[in-house]
Structure formats: C-alpha cells, structure tokens
Amino acid sequence: MMGTQRMKPVIALVGRPNVGKSTLFNRLTKSRDAIVADFAGLTRDRHYGQGRQGKYEYIVIDTGGFEPDAASGIYHEMAKQTQQAVAEADVVLFIVDARAGLSAQDHDIANYLRRLGKRCVLVANKAEGMREGAQLSEFYELGLGEVHPVSAAHGQGIRSLIEFALEPLQGPEPEEAPEDTATADVIRLAVAGRPNVGKSTLINAWLGEERLVAFDLPGTTRDAIRVPFERNGQRFELIDTAGLRRKGRVFEAIEKFSVVKTLQAIESAHVVLLLLDATQGVTDQDAHIAGFALESGRAVVLAVNKWDAVDEYQRQLLERSIETRLAFLKFAKIHFISAKKRQGLGPLWASIIEAYQSATRKMPTPQLTRVLHEAVQYQAPKRAGMFRPKLRYAHQGGMNPPVIVIHGNSLEHVADAYKRYLEGRFRKEFKLVGTPLRIEFKTSQ
Ligand code: GDP
Ligand code: GDP
C-alpha cells in the first residue's frame, strides 16, 4: 500500500530573543536516542532537530530569527529561512516570557502570526513556581487563545503542551503502525543533498533507464511526492526532497531547497542516498544533512557526484575531507559518480539494497548471544575499579536502525572502546553495511 507512512509534523518555535526558545528546543530534542553521542566530525544543526514526547514524534525548528530592530519592522526582520520555516510548519509555538510579561514586540509577532492563519499555540515560558491565573492573564490580550505555562529549563508542562499542539494533527491511522508489514518489499529511498548537487539530474538519469519502470501515480502524502518504481524486480519508492514536479516523463526542481522537506523525507525513508558535489567539497550543509540522517538512524549510501568535473588533486582533497568531516558515516559505502554523464550509477543500487537489508536484518537471540560470547572470549571487558562487567546474553531490540540489547551485570562500566569493539564484531558477523548500529546495555543488578 502506498502512502501509509506519515510525515512527522513540524513545530516551529517563534518568539523574541531571550524568552527561552533554544532552551525549549533542547528540551524538545534531547530525548532522542543518543546514537550520535561521541562521533568526531558530527556537526549538529542548531536550528533543526527531532524529538518525541510520549507517542508524539515531531521535527522542531528554532527560528531564532526575530531580532529587535524597530527601523525595519517585524516582517523584514525575519530571515528568509525563518519565514520559510514558519510557512512549512504545521504548528507554531509562540513563546513569551512569563516573568518579563508582555512586550510591544510580542504584540508585533502575534499580529504577524495571526495574519498567517496558521495553527498557533501560545506558550508562557519560565513559569516554574507560578500559580496559573493572575500572572498569566495579561497574555490573553494577544488574542491567541489559551496560554500554556511551561518551564523549559525545568521540564515542566512540556508533555501536555506537545499533546495539545499535535493532537489535532493526528490522522485516523493506527498509532503504532507495525513497521513495514504492508510495505515489506518496498524500499523507501530519499535522495538528499544541498541545492545543485545534482539530485534532479540523477533521478532523471535513473528514470531514463530502461530497467527502471516508474509507475504512473505519484502518491501524495501531505506535501511530499512519492514515486513508486521497480528495478530488476525490486520495488522502490522514491521520496522527494528536491521539490520535484513531474513534467511529462521528466522531473524538474521547481521549488527552492527546503530543509524541512529534506528532514521529513529522511525520516520516512529506509535508505538515504546522500549526494555530495565533488566540485564543492564537504560543506557545513552537507554535514548537517548527514548528521540528521545519522540521528534518525537511517541507512546511508554516499554518492559523490560531478566526479567528471574534478582533477586528480581535487579528488584527493575530497576523499580526505570526507574522511574527516563525515567520519561519523564510516559505515556507509561511498560511490563516485557522474549523474550527467551517467557514469557509476549502476553500482549504487547494490549498495542501496545492501543498506536496506542490513537495516532490516533479523538477528535471532541465540546467534546474537553466540557472537557476544565469542567476542568476550576473544577479549573480555576490562575491570573498572572493583567492577567487572559481565555480558550474559543479547537480543535484538529493534530494526531500522538495528538495535542490539546486551544483558548482564555492571554494564555501565563497559568502556566506549569496548562497545566499539563489540559493534565491529556484530557488524562483521551479521554483515551490517550501510546502516548505523545501536548497542544498548541492560544491567540486571
Ligand atoms: P532564546 O533567545 O529565546 O533562545 O532564549 P534562551 O533559550 O537562550 O534563554 C534565555 C534565558 O532564559 C537563559 O538565561 C535561560 O537560562 C533562561 N530560561 C530559559 N528557559 C527558562 C525557564 O523555563 N525558566 C527560567 N527561570 N529561565 C529560563
Ligand atoms: P539539484 O538542485 O540537486 O536537483 O541539482 P541539479 O540536478 O539541478 O543539478 C545542478 C547542476 O549541476 C546542473 O547544472 C547540472 O547540469 C549539474 N550537474 C548535475 N550532475 C552533474 C555531473 O555529474 N557532472 C557535472 N559536471 N555537472 C552535473
């Protein structure tokens, strides 16, 4: 079935400086699994993140863009990117400072937001220790309805705020759609990358291939275009990130680059094909997109495009900068391609399929436990003071990305280096290529 996978809703945080937007942003995003904790070279995008409160998953944007500047007026002050972010959000959290009270700037922002006609929730931050009612009543003046007191710093009121904000956006679908039962044989693929790396050129090169049969009905879920196709008997669904529109047999990028669409596409994909531009090297934006893919736990294939347009020296520089700046994607296969000249495109498919199969690999408990015991036998974890970690057995805790849960005693004392050693053993035994792998420890005493 098509289009069963929903895009995550997008929350934009708006408000004047100092009301606590970044504090709230951190609060809303930090519950994510820390798969990315200690990877060198990972740039975190300060303004875009993802998170979950209870059953609600979301993408959150800290617009941060309202700088006080009386001369130019509020609309001009908003950076283009900020406007776009607000436009793309499903719900805006408008944050005011419960301690400082209402300001003229709050009124300006409220007017702006009212005119947008977008779902808007008024949030009074720094409300720890305040009694509802009296102190918050002035905010009703803004004409944005109910005021939601929270404390971003202390984590109060956050869960119910998110419930209130996102509840109306919940579709009729089951809460916990069993992952991939209906779409088990369809690989959802997102082609991601900065503007001009060659996404549309690549997609059109593919679609021009005889072996690739595109079906005629691009399903539309919310804003995203999905193109179902088949290649050598394997079914795929291409999730658009490029703002593509179909023009006859050819796709054209007609919209400007959208970070939000990219993030949503990455979220709903099994495999992300991350395109880099060989003529530009690895830029911050590349690293951000890559970081987001990793944070989402997605399988990744790297493709360096425009390989035809660089000389030997540039190639070496590029390979080095991939090693350093994208070190956290060491698990991903790298391809050097030219979309324009249609060079190197065939082998991409094998890597995409391999990454998908790795990401969705089933690892039975007895086999996992056997690999664990062999690994420990070969090299036991070090003592930490009076504690000696004891690794007893392992089971699979999830797929896409694969999660391996190891049970035992004193596991909090397992060193990071040892965890990486175990990861290497599991990767090798289960042929996990192209996907992140998460290892969790559960101590029973
Ligand atoms: P932004 O400019 O809107 O991103 O605001 P920040 O997140 O940088 O916060 C501004 C200041 O408010 C910082 O000193 C925060 O520590 C403080 N702050 C943020 N949230 C709270 C809160 O819930 N309670 C209190 N008392 N202070 C907070
Ligand atoms: P998108 O914004 O990522 O969809 O990028 P496009 O597919 O629109 O490509 C941007 C520009 O890069 C266009 O001028 C393409 O012709 C060019 N381009 C794309 N692929 C290649 C390639 O493999 N080699 C070279 N030299 N140019 C390419």
Image (cartoon, rainbow, N blue to C red):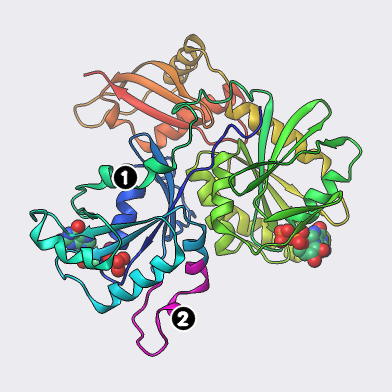
Number of numbered labels in the structure image: 2
**Residue 363 in picture, x, y percent from top left:** 53, 17
Q: Residue at x 13, y 54 (%)?
A: 128
Q: Is residue 68 magenta?
A: yes
* Mark 1 neighbour density, 10 Å: few (under 14) some (14–19) many (20 or more): few
Between the residue at mark 2 and the residue at mark 1, the CA separation in whole angstroms equals 31 Å
Q: Secondary structure at mark 2?
A: helix
Q: Residue at x 63, y 58 (%)?
A: 320
Q: Is residue 435 visible?
A: yes
User: Magenta span covers which residues?
Assistant: 65-83
Q: Which residue is mark 2?
A: 76
* Foreground tag (2 vs 1): 1
The amino acid type found where label 2 is placed reads His
Q: Residue furthest bottom?
A: 71
Would the CB of label 2 be found within 8 Å of ligand 1? no
Residue 1 location, quadrant: top right
Label of residue 164 in the image: 1
Q: Nearer the viewer, residue 89 or 272?
A: 89
Q: Nearer the viewer, residue 332 or 398?
A: 398
Q: Nearer the viewer, residue 344 or 63?
A: 63
Q: Residue furthest top?
A: 366
Are the residues flagged by discs 2 and 1 in contact, CB closer than 8 Å? no
Q: In which quadrant of this rendering is ligand 1 seen?
A: bottom left
**Residue 334 in picture, x, y percent from top left:** 69, 45
Image quarter (top left, top right, bottom left or bottom right) of the C terminus: top left
